[in-house]
Amino acid sequence: MKTIISILTVSLLTINAMAGIDDTKKGNAENSSHTFMVVKGKVVDKSTGEALAGVSVKLDDRTVAYTDFDGNFTVELTQPSAKISASLISYATAELEIKNQNKSITIELNSVE
């Protein structure tokens, strides 16, 4: 009896794994988008110039990155321009428009007191 249950379990796991592989391939083909441009940036405190770690970086209202310990981030654009925003607790959200000529940006956040 244990042998039959083991065989059925392995069979089901194999079928599920194969179905997942097919779905993944299909999803990647349908949702694939090429990178138009890579933008590198840094987020700093406007008053002190210090780098800010853990800042949420959004493109068109979708979080795509967080800054590292040195305030750096990298985002990939799939179109020539996009609205970028940066937000962190205790700071006002900053927004700007990235155009195809901006490959390196600095975002300054104002602290909220």
Image (cartoon, grey):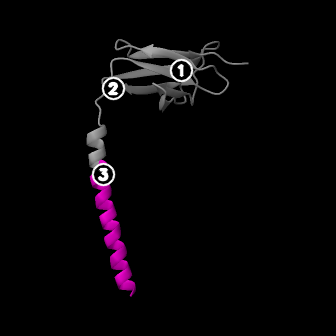
Q: Between marks 1 and 3, how big is the CA–CA gap? A: 38 Å
Q: Is residue 12 left or right of residue 84?
A: left
Crowd rating for badge 2 (residues with CA inside 10 Å; few <14, some 14–19, many 20+): few
Range of residues picked out in magenta = 1-24
Residue denoted by label 2: 78
Question: Counting residues from the N terminus, which is met first, the one under dot 1 or under dot 3?
Answer: 3
The kind of residue tagged 3 is Asp
Residue denoted by label 3: 23
The kind of residue tagged 2 is Thr
Q: Between marks 3 and 2, how big is the CA–CA gap? A: 23 Å
Residue 15 magenta-drawn? yes
Query: Disc 1 vs disc 3: Cβ atoms closer than 8 Å?
Result: no
Of the 4 image quadrants, the one containing the C terminus is top right
Q: Between marks 2 and 1, how big is the CA–CA gap? A: 22 Å
Q: Quadrant of residue 90?
A: top right
Question: Counting residues from the N terminus, which is met first, the one under dot 3 or under dot 2?
Answer: 3
Q: Secondary structure at mark 3?
A: helix
Query: Disc 3 vs disc 2: Cβ atoms closer than 8 Å?
Result: no
Residue beneath the point at 41% across and 27% down: 75
| Residue 58: x %, y % from top left | 49, 27
